Amino acid sequence: MQLLKFSNGNGKLKNRLIFSLPAGHSCPHAGVCKTFADRVTGLITDLPQYTGTEADEFRCFAAMAEVRPNVRAARWHNWDLIREVIHSNGSQAVLLRDLIDLSLTMQAPKELVRVHESGDFWTENYMRAWLMAAAQRPKQTFYAYTKSLGMWYNLRDQIPSNFYLTASHGGTLDYLLPKYGDVFQRIAYVVYTEQQAEELGLEIDHDDSHCLGDKPFALLVHGSQRAGSDAMKALTQRKKEGGFVGYGKSNQKTI
């Protein structure tokens, strides 16, 4: 039986399991960050979507990792396997939960599990499966950034206490953030500069620790950005000033 693949940390995040799907392809509500890597060639395509709210445009950090064949292969393996299960007979959520649980059982145990370094919850049953799997593993802490706010809202009463969701600002459902502020309390905003974060009254996160908190926070744009874009200009300026520009080469190992 084929199992899902996980990464054991990366250049930014240590000592945790990380699950990923193909960036863009599996992100139904991606907005300003929508970026794809071709499955075969790894060629990057930028396709930012209108969000109806003020959000700085940037190229998806995770998509750029898919220029590497081994990263693409692992992420597409996961997505192909999940879609295969969804199209089989039986309860989608239960079958997916069982696949996730068995795949986690075969990994060296880690206290933290990040769901979707790349990709997002792209069906409600798929999201429900992750929530069910987490509920069966109370000794582990699961967390995820998501722009699938409608699914989150619909399943808000089914989220176990060990699963932390952070709303990722800049998606096509941003209008739900103020409408249901009691649900979407943890929101991540991508900013170009430290000053911008300060003006918004947001702390900057560098290690996902804010994902386990209870208030909004900021993430500094980083990685490879489009030439001539405002995001690239911000990175160039930070580099000149000796500031933060990225987390270095990924040292993640797919297992």
Image: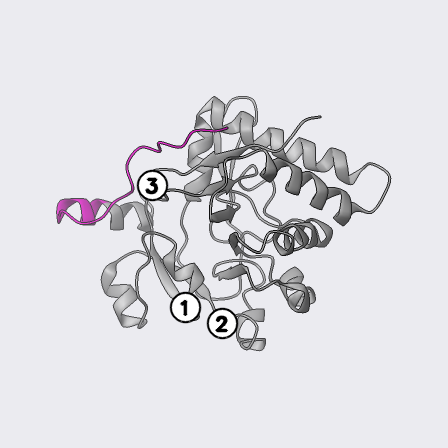
Give the vertical position of 199 relative to 84 (above or below): below
Occupied quadrant, residue 176: bottom right
Gap in angstroms between the C-alphas marked 1 and 2:
7 Å
Among numbered discs 2 and 3, the one appearing first in the sequence: 2
Label 3 sits on a secondary structure element that is loop
Instruction: Name which residue type carries label 2.
Output: Gln
What residue occupies the far left of the structure in this picture? 241
Gap in angstroms between the C-alphas marked 1 and 3:
22 Å
Gap in angstroms between the C-alphas marked 2 and 3:
27 Å
User: Is 8 placed left or right of 183 in the picture?
Assistant: left
Q: Viewer-nearest of labels 1 and 3?
A: 1
Q: Nearer the viewer, residue 164 or 110?
A: 110
Mark 2 and mark 3 residues within 8 Å of each other at the beta carbon: no
Residue 216: which disc? 1
Q: Quarter of the image for the N terminus: give it.
A: top right
Q: Which residue is mark 3?
A: 223
Q: Nearer the viewer, residue 62 or 49?
A: 62
Residue 113: which disc? none
Among numbered discs 1 and 3, the one appearing first in the sequence: 1
Q: Which residue is mark 2?
A: 185
Residue drawn 52% across and 44% down? Answer: 47
Give the vertical position of 1 relative to 127 (above or below): above
Give the residues in magenta.
236-255
